[in-house]
Amino acid sequence: MTHGFKFCCIAITVLLSLFVAVALCNVFLVSPSSLFHALSDRSIWLVIQVSLKTSLLAASLAVFLGTPVAYVLARKRFFGKAVVETLLDLPVALPPMVAGLALLVLVSPASPTGRVLAKAGIHLIFTQTGIVLAQLFVALPFYIRAVRSAIAAIPPSIPAAAAVLRASEAYTFFHVILPLSREGMISGFVMCWTRALGEFGATAMVAGCIPGVTETLPIAIYTRATAGDLASAGAAAFCLALISFVTLVGLRLAFKEEVLGRKA
Amino acid sequence: MITLDNIGKRFDQREVLKGLSFCVARGEFAILFGPSGSGKTLLLSLIAGLDQPTAGRVLIDGDDMTRVSPEKRPVTLVFQRHALFPHLTVFENIAFSLRARHTHRSVVRERVGELLALTGLEEYAHAKPDVLSGGQCQRVAFARALASDAEVILFDEPLSSMDHGLKVGLMSELKRLHRMKKFTALYVTHNLDEALTLGERVYMLEDGHVERSGTPREMLGCGNEQRALTSRRTGGLSLPNV
């Protein structure tokens, strides 16, 4: 009975591993000639450019907006904190299409918010700004979670020591809290950026798929695969995987292995 | 001068400090002595402004500081486990308070240099706290507190994790620093040796209020009965025979 159970567990593990490996091989084992052919097409470089630009901008915005939020959630007690935490976490659990629809309704020219934005000259529908908004909406919670954990891990005596050494809260934030949360910030940035880079549903809903303008790598994979151009879709998928892989390896080397490994 | 006026602190149903009042004179080295859990550390937090009392007032040199934020009080605190900033060097730890108050760079260099010399830490100026011994960390904490220019320095059992030899050395160093800088000190401990060696006045905290107080000589002068009582209350610590 014990042997039978062990055999079943091992068999399921092996079958699942094979399933994942075969599925990924079909996509990533792109022949050099078809990869060269796909990369010689100027449109794929435009897609890569749009993806990198928007996702890096979304991740950078997440750092500016998410760091103070993470600090407040980690260090402050206030009425309704649980509600705020749940709201900020919701995009993680929400299907991206639902998130996209919510954003579309919020910023469409027919909505009051959309009208205010249009008057201010801000156009989000079918624009790269819209892509950044969608990516930020979906990826921000990943950054906040990572940084919040890092700040919460700082012993309370450290900011208390700064306070009794006559440092203002702002000075303590910039000179103590941020340097001590550096690992969490790097880890959060990477998680947020890779999530933004791979974002599909919300981006497609808000920004659509205008080649050369709002076409990102995940959208390019989808449109090319559904058009039957599997070689081109495979090349785009290969590029997406390669960018993520090179960035992760680069960051590991730059910030030492434990920075990303510990948070993983 | 520290004046505690009828200080009370309650956590839900539990009253930890009950109408506690006493004064520490300017420049005095006072000891707050009592068993674990008697509210000594909590009282320091209230004086430093890291926590708020549920009743009473904290006065420093006659000014009511009860609702003043910690960074605006002329008070600093030396923590039990040093609480040094791990990302800063010894020099930067000591300079922290000066830089936080936007002191000129040349003044920072001069003051920190003086304090490094005073605490014998010159050769460790560029070391991070993780390479220092417990005794060296505590000396950095002393120097950092002195750099804050606070009139009052609170000590939360700073020598509790040290071995006897190191403790004796640091106690004499602390006495020397106090003689030189003349700050007002309130030192929390449950160690009788520390209380009687360092203190100019000893306050014994028991059940949330000051049970008795006096000079170390007066405290030592209490009879055998009192000594036995103290021993029981402090979990086995007893007053030395005189």
Image (spheres, helix red, strand yellow):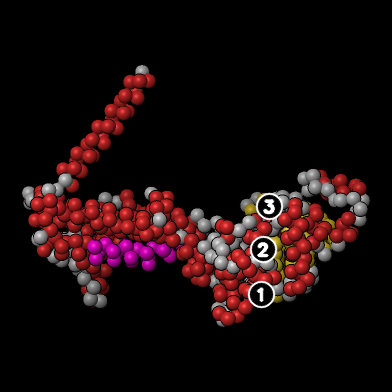
Viewer-proximal residue, B222 or B38?
A: B222
Q: Position of residue B184 (x, y in %)?
A: 75, 70
* Nearer the camera: disc 3 or disc 1: 1
* Nearer the camera: disc 2 or disc 3: 2
Judge whether residue B3 can be spotted in this image: no
Q: Determine the chain carrying the residue at label 1.
A: B
Q: Which residue occupies 60% across, 65% down? A: B124
Instruction: Tell me which numbered mark, 1 or 2, is placed earlier along the sequence.
Output: 1
Query: Which amino acid is tagged 3?
Result: Ser
Q: Which residues are magenta?
A: A52-71
Q: Quadrant of residue A135?
A: bottom left
Say above or below: B58 vs B234.
Answer: below
Residues at circles 2 and 3 in contact by the CB criterion of under 8 Å = no
Q: Position of residue B136 (x, y in %)?
A: 65, 60
Residues at circles 1 and 2 in contact by the CB criterion of under 8 Å = no
Mark 3: give few (<14), some (14-19) or many (20+) Cα within 10 Å: few
The disc at residue B114 is 1
Query: Which amino acid is tagged 1?
Result: Glu
Query: Which amino acid is tagged 2?
Result: Arg
The disc at residue B139 is 2
Say above or below: B204 vs A213.
Answer: above
